[in-house]
Image (spheres, grey):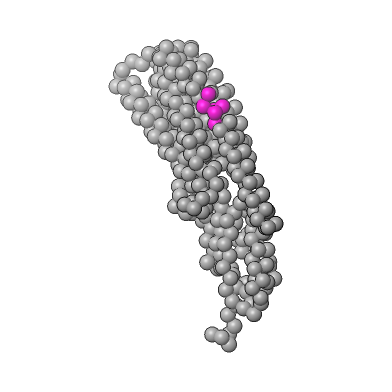
Amino acid sequence: MNNKNNVGADGSTELMDSRLRERRIYKVTLYGAIANVLLCVAKLIAGVIGRSSAMIADGVHSLSDLITDIVVIAFVRISSKPQDRGHEYGHGKYETLATTIIGLMLLFVGLGIMWNSLTQIWACIQGEHIKSPDWIALWAALLSIVVKEYLFQYTRRAGRQLNSQAVIANAWHHRSDALSSIGTTIGIGGALLLGEHWTVLDPIAAFIVSLLIIHASIEQLRPSLGELVEKSLPEEVEDEIRRIILSCPGVTDPHNLRTRKIGNRKSVDVHVRMDGDISLNEAHDKTKDIEHHIKNAIGQDTFVMIHVEPIKHPECQ
C-alpha cells in the first residue's frame, strides 16, 4: 500500500515538473514571438521606405523567427506529455524534431538571403545603379541589434535552465538575427556615409549575413540530427558509466553498452557480470545501486536498463 502511494506521489511530482517546464517554455517563447512581430513589421516598413535590400532581408529573417516561435510552442506541448502506452520513453523526440525544423528553416532563410544579395551584387557589377538606403533603415537595424541580443541572452539562459534543445535553438535564432542586423547596419551605414558609389555595400552586407545565418543553422542541425539517428552519448559520458559500474563490488565486464538521447532525457542500456551463486535479492540491490549512481552522474530522469549475466568460470567453458 505504501509503495503505491510513493509511486503515485513520484508520478504527480514528475507531472507537475513537466507542466511547470512547459509553462516556462511558453512564457519565454511568447516574449520572443511578440518581439519578433514588432521587429518584423518595423524592419519591413523601414526596408521599403528606406530602400534597403539588406533591411528587407533582415525583416524576412525576423519573420522566420516568428515562425520558429510557433513551432517551439506546438512541439514542446507535445514533448511535455507524460509516458503512455504508445510512447513508453515519453515524447521527448518531438522536441528534437522541433529543433531540426528550426535549423532547416534557418538554413533556407540564409540561402534565400544569399541568393538575393548575390543577384544584386551581380547587377552592380553589370553597371546597374542601386539606390542609396535611407536613415530610417539604419535606425531600425540598430534597434534590432539591441532587442535581439537581449532576447538571445534571455532565451539561452532559460533554455539551459530548462534543458530544452528547442529553446536553445530558438535562442540562437535570435542571435543570428542580431548578427544579421549588425551586418545590415554596417552595409547601410557604409552606403549612407560613403556615397552612391558605395551602395553595393548594402547587398554585400546581406551576403555576409547570409553566411552567418547558414553557419548558425548547421550548428543547430548537427546535434538534433545526431539524436534523431540515435547517436550515442559523448565518449566521456560512456566512460563515466563504465567507471560507475566497475566501482560496484562484485560487478565486472560492462559490455553491450548502448546510450542515446530522448529529447531532454538520456537512455542507458548495458550488460554486466556478477557471481552466479549470489542471491537474486543481492543482484537486484547491486543493479539498483548502479542505477542510482548513474542517474546522479548524468540525470535523475535517465532511463537505465541493466542486464545481469553470470561470471564465466574457466571450468564451465
Spot occupied by residue 196 in the image (x, y as percentages of width and height): 40, 13
Q: Is residue 59 left or right of residue 124?
A: right
Q: Would residue 199 be visible to someone looking at this image? A: yes
Q: Residue furthest front?
A: 1
Quadrant that contains the C terminus: bottom right
Q: Residue furthest left?
A: 126
Spot occupied by residue 286 in the image (x, y as percentages of width and height): 67, 68
Q: Residue at x 67, y 67 (%)?
A: 285
Q: In terms of secondary structure, what is the magenta stretch mainly? A: helix
Q: Residue at x 46, y 43 (%)?
A: 97
Closer to the camera, 8 or 252?
8
Spot occupied by residue 169 in the image (x, y as percentages of width and height): 52, 38
Q: Residue at x 60, y 35 (%)?
A: 24
Closer to the camera, 49 or 168?
168
Callout count: 0
Say above or below: 184 vs 76.
above
Q: Which residues are magenta?
A: 29-34
Closer to the camera, 127 or 189?
189
Q: Is residue 287 left or right of residue 216?
A: right
* Picture quadrant where residue 28 is located: top right
Quadrant that contains the N terminus: bottom right
Say above or below: 175 vs 281.
above
Q: Would residue 226 be visible to someone looking at this image? A: no
* Picture quadrant where residue 131 is located: top left
